[in-house]
Amino acid sequence: MAIKKVEGSLNVVEAAKQRIKNIFSNGVKVYLAFSGGKDTLCMCNLVYELAMRGEINPKLLTCVFIDEEALYKSMFQMALQWRKRFIALGAEFRWYCLPVYQVSMLHHLADDESWITWEPGKEDVWIRKPPPFAILRDPALEYSGQMNYQTFLPKVCMDGLMMVGVRAAESVQRVKYLSTVNMTAGHITGKNIVYPIYDWKDSDVWLYIKEHHLEFPQAYIDLYRVGVKKSQLRLCNFFASESIAGLRYIAETDPELWDRIQKREPNAYLALLYWDSEMFHRNTAKRQALESNEPPKDYKALCKKILFDEPDKYFTNAKRRDVARAYRNLYVKGFSFMQPKHFKKMYEAVMAGDPKLRSLRAIYTDIFTDYTKYSRRTDPSKGVSTNG
């Protein structure tokens, strides 16, 4: 699917304000999905300033925060601050500490890629205690650990519209998804979700934070100081694929927190040993240098081996078998168009684990993009030289 970018007459900040005002103009409940990250903080400030100026009704607003237990301390502090601000406005702030399903990259070798936040019976190893005002149970959560927060949130927010701070610039997959959403009526998904800042770039986010003097989690500064690129500054629970490598920084800078993390997740040490490896989807210059003297691998043959010849050896539970089926489907569909680099990405994604199939979607996009470029170079009807 081709994606066409269209320039608007408003800058991204004014466009976001107008979207938010449109959302509140319906007179129905409005939910704001809060995370404590930089994108959510920008969206929160937009809503807060509009409410302070009387341009939207804060009585319609309910903030929903899914506390994932494994959070940076500075994100927890941001949540406390914004809870006070929104309650002072007359809005509701729901702070959930629920036993929901999460993906953990640390469990891959233990034949399980999940963990349960605030898991009952493990109170003695929780990374921290829930705040006294937290919601610990909800009827919408059918049974402990069998629902993730992406499923839970639409259920508890189904009687209104939910604003989420997802942006297209974060990944190719989100560009494709949001381009589809924005072709539907009103830019609203089937689950009543709206993305007011979907067209903001990283530079827009940081510029807004600077110009409005917004406080943001110290964790961003810590990660940037130790070498994390600005485009990769994302804060989520410690054990997700997007943030797992950051565990080594916690071990260096916050021994007390690191001790609690190890009690909660005994496999946390793996991140210190293997963060720069295919286990955690890493492909740094250091890893390339270490592997440069090794014999080249036939990744096409390796993919065939693990997906078709010996699947029972590599996919030992139901979730992994579901992932294997998705990758086998890609292998069959894309085999004729795939290049060695695509097979390499496929092999490494499967070996590292891809429970959310994010890597799978990225590989699909890479194959399509590379095939399109190749077709243009080789097809005279496209008006492109075949000698290049």
Image (cartoon, rainbow, N blue to C red):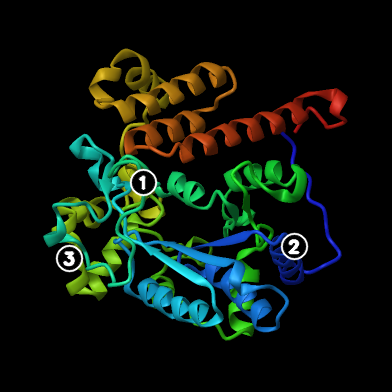
Q: Earlier in the sequence, mark 2 or mark 3?
A: 2
Q: Residue at x 23, y 74 (%)?
A: 254
Query: Considering the numbered disc 2 on the image, is that residue within a helix, a strand or a loop?
Result: helix
Displayed quadrant of residue 15: bottom right
Q: Residue at x 38, y 25 (%)?
A: 322
For this view, does 365 lie left or right of residue 111? right
Query: Considering the numbered disc 3 on the image, is that residue within a helix, a strand or a loop?
Result: helix
User: Does 351 sit above or below residue 311?
Assistant: below
Whether residue 59 is visible: yes
Q: Which mark is residue 260?
A: 3
Whether residue 221 is visible: no
* Nearest to the observer: residue 44 or residue 143: 143
* Nearest to the observer: residue 287 or residue 174: 174
Labelled pair 3, 1 in contact (Cβ < 8 Å): no
Mark 1 packing: few (<14 Cα in 10 Å), some, or many (20+)?
many
Label 2 – label 1 distance at C-alpha: 31 Å
Label 3 – label 1 distance at C-alpha: 27 Å
Query: Considering the numbered disc 1 on the image, is that residue within a helix, a strand or a loop?
Result: loop
Residue beneath disc 2: 22
Labelled pair 2, 1 in contact (Cβ < 8 Å): no
Residue beneath disc 1: 141
Q: Position of residue 345 (x, y in %)?
A: 45, 35
**Mark in front: 3 vs 1:** 1
Labelled pair 2, 3 in contact (Cβ < 8 Å): no
